[in-house]
Amino acid sequence: MKRGFIGRLEEIEESLSRLFAGRVRVRSLPPRRARVAFLPPVRRGPINIEHLDSRQNAPVTGSLASEWRCVRPHRMNLALAGSVKIHSAPLEVRPPLTKGSLSFGISPTIKDATERIRFLPQVRGNRVRYLKEKPFVEGSGLIALFSPIIKDALLREVLERERGVLLIWYDVSSDAVLPYMLALFRRLDASQGDIFSWRWLPGA
Amino acid sequence: MSPQKGLALGYLRLIEEGNLFQGAALVTDFRGIPLDFRYTEPISPTRLERILYGDALDVYIREEVILESLLKAVEVKPSLWVCNDRKLLEFLKEHAACPPIFLESTSYSPLDAVGEMVPQPEAGAYLVQVDPISAPLKLIVPVSTGEDAVKSAASILIEAAASMELLEPFARIKRALEAVAAGEITE
C-alpha cells in the first residue's frame, strides 16, 4: 500500500515537472555564444494528505450537475487517496422546482371590422361570354352583362372601365332579395351622344 | 330562385407572405352583404419560434393559431365554410361547426344544366354548375365526406349563386386587409 502511495507521489512529481518545464522560456542565442540553457530543478514541495478514515460511509453530497436527469454516481475515485474508500450513496437532494405557468406559443390578436367592411363594394364580372341566348334590343348590341344584382337593395353602381367590372354598393338595411341582371348595350346607329344604355333584366 | 333568408356563407382566407401570416373570416348573407368580419393582426414568428417549431411551424400558425382563433371569434355561424386553401379542409372538418368546402374558379365551358356535378380524378373533387351564366366551379370536400353531404353543400351553393357571386368575397377580404394595413379601416 505504501509503495503505491509513493508511486503516486512520483507520478505527481513528474506531472508537475512537465507542467513547469512547458512554461520555461527558451531563448535563441547566436551560434558562437550558444550554451545550454540552465533549467532550475523542480522542487518537491511538501504534500499533505488528509486521512479520511473518520469520514468513511459518509453520504456524498452531490453537485447540481450530478442531479441533472437524476444521474446517480455509484463510484467515485479520489486521485490522491488510494487508501481511502469512498462509498456511494443515493442522492436525495433534488433541485428546487419553480412553480408557475410557462408562456409558450403564439397568440394572435383578433379584430372585428364588420361595420367597416360594409363600406367596401361588391364586384361583378362581365358574364356576357357565358350567355347561350343573348337578349336582343333592336339597334343595339349587348357588350356586358353583370349578374346577380339585388336591384331593390342597390345604393350605387360604378363601372370600372379598365377592368370591365361593375362595383356595387348595397343598402345593408334593405330586405330586398330578388336578383336581376344588369345589361350594357351599345347603340349601333348612334354616332354621337349617349351610345351606351343600361337595362335591367330578370335574374338568370 | 330567390335567396333563403337566414342562411349565410362563411369565407376563410389565409395570407402568407414571406415571414408574415394573416387570416380573416367573412360571413355574408346570401346577397353577399357582410354579417361578421374578423381578422388577425399579421403574425411574424421569431427566429427562436422557427427553431422550436421546425417544419410544424407553418401548420401550427395556420391551423391552431389563426383558424382556431377565427372560428372562436366569429359570432354569426354560417351554413358552410368556404376556403381557398384545400390544406385547411381536414382541420376545419374536425373543428368547425358546419361543413367546410374548397371552392375555385375554372375556365371550363358551362355544364349542361345548373346543379350538374362531374366527379374529378382528385378525391373529393367535383365540377359544379351553380348558375346558368358562368363557368363551373371546382368544389372539393374533405375526404370521406358522404354523398349526401356533398349534395347538400352543392345545393347551398346553387341557392346562394342566384343572388351573389360565390367567389367574390375572397377578393373583398383581400381588399379589406389591404385597407386595414393602409390604415383605411380601423376599429
Image: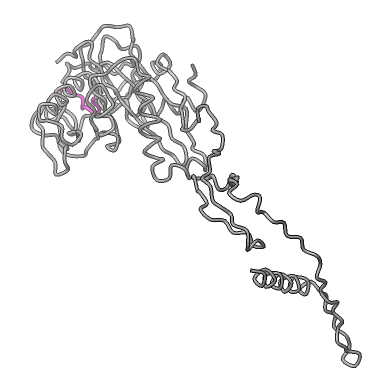
Work out whether residue B165 or residue B47 is closer to the camera in this orientation and state it: B47
Q: Residue at position x 36%, y 38% from top?
A: B59
Q: Residue at position x 14%, y 29% from top?
A: B150
- Residue A141 on the magenta span: yes
Work out whether residue B14 or residue A58 is closer to the camera in this orientation and state it: A58
**Residue A18, how many percent across, how many down?**
73, 74
Which image quarter: residue B174?
top left
For the image shown, how many numbered marks are present on the structure?
Answer: 0
Q: Residue at position x 15%, y 29% from top?
A: A131
Quarter of the figure that contains the N terminus of chain B: top left
Q: Chief secondary structure of the magenta span?
A: strand
Work out whether residue B48 or residue A150 is closer to the camera in this orientation and state it: B48
Work out whether residue A146 or residue B54 is closer to the camera in this orientation and state it: B54
**Residue B58, how many percent across, how many down?**
39, 40
For this view, does B102 lie left or right of residue A133? right
Q: How is the image coloured?
A: one colour
**Residue A38, how many percent across, how many down?**
87, 81
Q: Is residue B75 above or below residue A63?
A: above
Q: Is residue B111 above or below residue B75?
A: below
* Boundaries of the magenta span: A136-145
